[in-house]
Image (cartoon, helix red, strand yellow):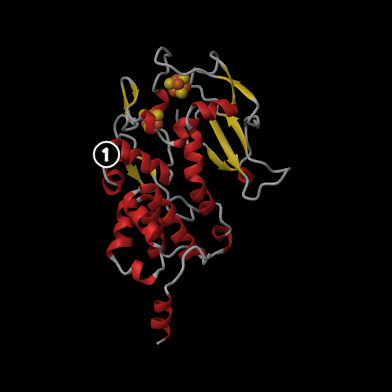
C-alpha cells in the first residue's frame, strides 16, 4: 500500500538498494497480517491527475466535490507547481478510504498505493549511467517483507495494475519534469490556479473549454472536441497540452487564423 514514493533520482541519497525490472524481492500483503491497513494512516499520498480521475469515477462524484472532500493542496518551500494530497482523517489520521475489509476504492486506488512497497526514482535526463530505478521501501510498520512469494519488480508492477497509470501519467510526468521549473519564472497566482484546474479539477477545466471563448480562439478539430466532451481521459490529455502551450510556449495548440487577424487589427 501507500507512501509518497516517487523521487527525482538525482536529488535523493537512497538508503535502499537500486533495483532493475528483473531484480527480485519477497513480499506478501493480506488481511491475516497483524499490520493489515496500518499503512493506510498518517501517510502523505501525492495524487496524480490520473489518480484523481480514477478516484472520482470510483466514487461517482465530480472533481470539485472530490477535491473539496478528500484532498489538500499544501505549499512546501521550493515547490514550483501546485500539488494535491489525500486528506487523512484529522482525529484518527486514517485514509478516508480505509475500511475493515481494506481499501474501499481498491480497483481505483492511487499509483503510490499500487506500487507499495516499491518506490521509484526517475532521472530528469536519463542516460545509460543515470537510469530510472526502483527500490523496496522497508518500514517497521509493514510486516509483509519476511514472507510470501518472490516477485520480480516487473511482475509486481504488472500484478498491481500499475502500467495503465504509467501510460496515463506520462504526459503529467513530462510536464512536471520539464526544464521550465529550473529555468522559467515562478508561476503567477493566476498561472498556478490554471495549473491546478487543468491537472486536478477536470470537470471545471471542461467547463472552461466549453463555456468561455476558448474554442473561438484555438483551432481544435471537431472529433477532438467531441472526445473532450465525452471522456475525462481526453480532457486530461488536452489540459496538459494546454499547459504546455500556455506555460512553456510549446506548439501543442493552434491559434485560429481569425484570432491572429483580430489581434493584429
Ligand atoms: S487509497 Fe486505499 S490503499 Fe491507499 S491509503 Fe487509502 S485505503 Fe490505503
Ligand atoms: S503487509 Fe504492509 S502493505 Fe500490507 S497491510 Fe501490512 S503494512 Fe500494509
- Residue 162 location (% of width, % of height): 49, 34
Residue to which mark 1 is pinned: 60
Task: Kindly indicate the quadrant of the structure image that contains residue 17.
Answer: top right
In the image, residue 181 sits, relative to residue 108, either above or below, namely below
Whether residue 117 appears in this view of the structure is: no
- Residue 64 location (% of width, % of height): 28, 49
- The residue that appears at 31% across and 20% down in the rendered structure is 100
- Residue 228 location (% of width, % of height): 36, 54
Left or right, residue 147 beside residue 40: right
In the image, residue 108 sits, relative to residue 195, either above or below, namely above
In the image, residue 140 sits, relative to residue 12, either above or below, namely above
Tell me the quarter of the image containing the C terminus.
bottom left
Secondary structure found at label 1: loop
- Residue 200 location (% of width, % of height): 37, 50
> Which quadrant does ligand 1 occupy?
top left
Whether residue 72 appears in this view of the structure is: yes
Left or right, residue 130 beside residue 79: right
Tell me the quarter of the image containing the N terminus.
top left
Left or right, residue 170 beside residue 51: right
Amino acid at each position: 500500500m501507500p507512501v509518497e514514493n516517487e523521487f527525482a533520482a538525482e536529488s535523493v541519497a537512497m538508503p535502499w538498494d537500486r533495483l532493475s525490472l528483473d531484480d527480485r524481492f519477497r513480499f506478501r500483503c493480506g488481511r491475516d497480517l497483524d499490520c493489515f491497513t496500518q499503512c493506510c494512516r498518517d501517510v502523505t499520498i501525492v495524487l496524480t491527475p490520473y489518480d484523481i480521475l480514477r478516484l472520482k469515477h470510483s466514487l461517482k462524484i465530480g472533481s470539485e466535490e472530490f477535491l473539496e472532500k478528500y484532498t489538500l493542496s499544501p505549499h512546501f518551500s521550493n515547490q514550483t507547481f501546485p500539488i494535491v494530497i489525500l486528506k487523512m482523517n484529522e482525529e484518527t489520521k486514517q485514509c478516508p478510504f480505509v475500511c475493515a475489509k481494506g481499501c474501499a476504492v481498491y480497483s481505483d486506488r492511487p499509483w503510490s498505493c499500487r506500487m507499495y512497497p516499491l518506490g521509484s526514482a526517475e532521472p530528469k535526463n536519463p542516460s545509460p549511467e543515470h537510469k530510472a530505478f526502483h527500490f523496496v521501501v522497508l518500514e517497521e510498520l509493514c510486516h509483509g517483507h519476511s514472507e510470501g512469494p518472490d516477485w520480480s519488480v516487473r511482475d509486481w508492477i504488472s500484478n498491481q495494475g500499475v502500467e495503465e497509470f504509467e501510460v496515463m501519467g506520462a504526459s503529467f510526468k513530462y510536464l512536471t519534469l520539464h526544464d521550465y521549473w529550473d529555468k522559467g519564472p515562478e508561476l503567477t497566482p493566476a498561472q498556478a490556479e490554471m495549473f491546478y484546474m487543468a491537472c486536478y479539477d477536470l470537470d471545471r477545466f471542461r467547463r472552461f473549454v466549453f463555456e468561455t471563448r476558448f474554442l473561438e480562439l484555438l483551432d481544435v478539430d471537431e472529433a477532438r472536441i467531441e472526445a473532450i466532451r465525452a471522456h475525462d481521459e481526453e480532457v486530461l490529455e488536452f489540459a496538459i497540452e494546454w499547459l504546455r502551450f500556455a506555460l512553456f510556449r510549446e506548439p501543442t495548440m493552434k491559434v485560429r487564423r481569425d484570432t491572429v487577424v483580430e489581434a493584429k487589427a
